[in-house]
Amino acid sequence: MSDEAKPFDSLFVGELSRLFAWRRDVRRFRTDPVDAAVLQACLDDAELAPSVGNSQPWRWVDVQSAAARQAIRDNFAACNDEALTGYSGEKAQLYASLKLAGLDAAPVQLAVFCDVATEQGAGLGRRTMPEMLEYSAITAVHTFWLAARARGLGVGWVSILDPQAVDRALDVPADWKLVAYLCVGWPEEEHVDPELARHGWQQRSSATARLHVR
């Protein structure tokens, strides 16, 4: 058995569990730039993510222009205001107090799309579950997230956006579907607990609450 194929030792397993615990959704970033080589290393690791039929349907858009970033920021503000109307009383007050995105400070912003028309993979595994393409793109997002955290970077996933407005702002092909908008940078704070739990929105529950046996 080659060294690459040998099982990982207990020290590595413990460190991996620690990485999972520190993989937090970051909303508070320093404005310090991220070295291009560090970002590329994270993207290279993301290419190791599994994908249906080996299709690699993820597409990354590095959002750098001030105009595009402002369009995304305006999109978020409008969607966030609309979301607030769905709450009332103390829940509305709490929602309004939450910091839900790092769009103002994150030095790197990546829009991640799924190319639903990709020919790579020749359709294997997609006839019965075509959504597997999008699930594959999401595995790339998560792999990138862990790769970034292992290097000390923080990642925040912004979901309070109108996907069609993002498509227009970034002028992407019609066959690309938005799966994630990521803020990436050096965290302003370090916490092992989720920010939403820390600020009283929702606590995490245990794995046994979601395990079902048939």
Image: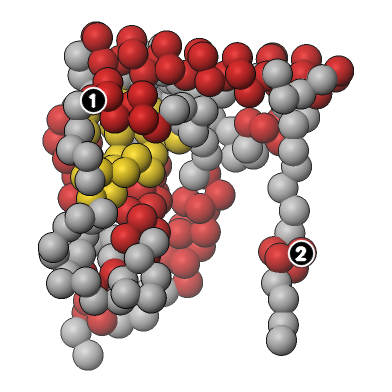
Q: Secondary structure at mark 2?
A: helix
Q: Nearer the viewer, residue 59 or 187?
A: 59
Q: Is residue 141 above or below residue 66?
A: below
Please state if 70 lies on the left or on the right of 213 as rendered.
left
The residue that disc 2 covers is: 209
> Residue at 22% across / 90% down in the picture?
1
Secondary structure of the residue carrying tag 1 is: helix
Residue 184 appears in the picture as rendered: no
Q: At x 27% / y 24%, what residue is drawn?
A: 168
Residue visible at 60% across and 14% down in the picture: 81
Q: Which residue is mark 1?
A: 170
- Residue 51 at x, y percent in the picture: 28, 65
Work out which quarter of the rendered image holds the C terminus and state it.
Answer: bottom right
Looking at the rendered structure, the kind of residue marked 1 is Leu
Neighbor class of circle 2 (other Cα within 10 Å; few <14, some 14-19, many 20+) is few
Q: Residues within 10 Å of mark 1 (few under 14, many from 20)?
A: some
At x 69% / y 15%, what residue is drawn? 96
